[in-house]
Image: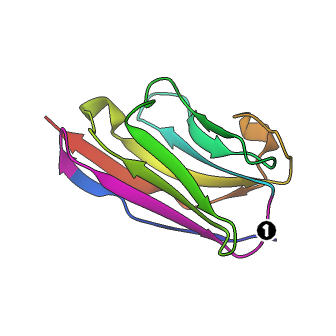
Amino acid sequence: QVQLVESGGGSVQAGGSLRLSCAASGYTPTMAWFRQAPGKEREGVGAIYGGGESFVADSVKGRFTISKDNAKHTLSLQMNSLKPEDTALYYCAASTHPYPLMARGRYDYWGQGNQVTVSS
């Protein structure tokens, strides 16, 4: 099994920045970030797929940057220009599929979640 250890998160004012990090204990082709706000479904934020392709959701495009350190199996999410609507519990996930897209059922491993709160 692969363990995912998340770090980062916190509370910031709108317009601020945060950086999330997720360290995996081993290799998986795909690593991704999801988030879930109260009363809403979990949604994909971004991913780096097995072939190296990157994905970020339209809602965060231009503000969030996803990156991966392949040697350390570490996924990062740099979040800039944060908005109150970005407030959510952010989860790191990893998949054995090379191109799972953002289908929750295709992700095999999940982190514990990090709270990101953005105030007005």
**Where is 112 relative to 40, above or below?**
below
Q: Is residue 43 left or right of residue 120?
A: right
Q: Quadrant of the C terminus?
A: top left
Q: Residue at the location (38% across, 58% down)?
A: 19
Asked whether 15 falls inside the magenta stretch, the response is yes
Q: What is the quadrant of residue 25 in the picture? A: bottom right
Q: In this view, does 15 lie to the left or right of 40?
A: left
- Picture coordinates of residue 85, whole percent (x, y): 32, 30
- Picture coordinates of residue 48, whole percent (x, y): 67, 47
Q: How many numbered discs?
A: 1
- Picture coordinates of residue 89, whole percent (x, y): 44, 47
- Which residue occupies the extreme right position in the image? 97
Magenta range: 12-28
Q: Residue at the location (50% across, 41% down)?
A: 35
Q: Residue at the location (56% across, 54% down)?
A: 67
The residue singled out by tag 1 in the image is 27
Q: What is the quadrant of residue 18 in the picture? A: bottom left
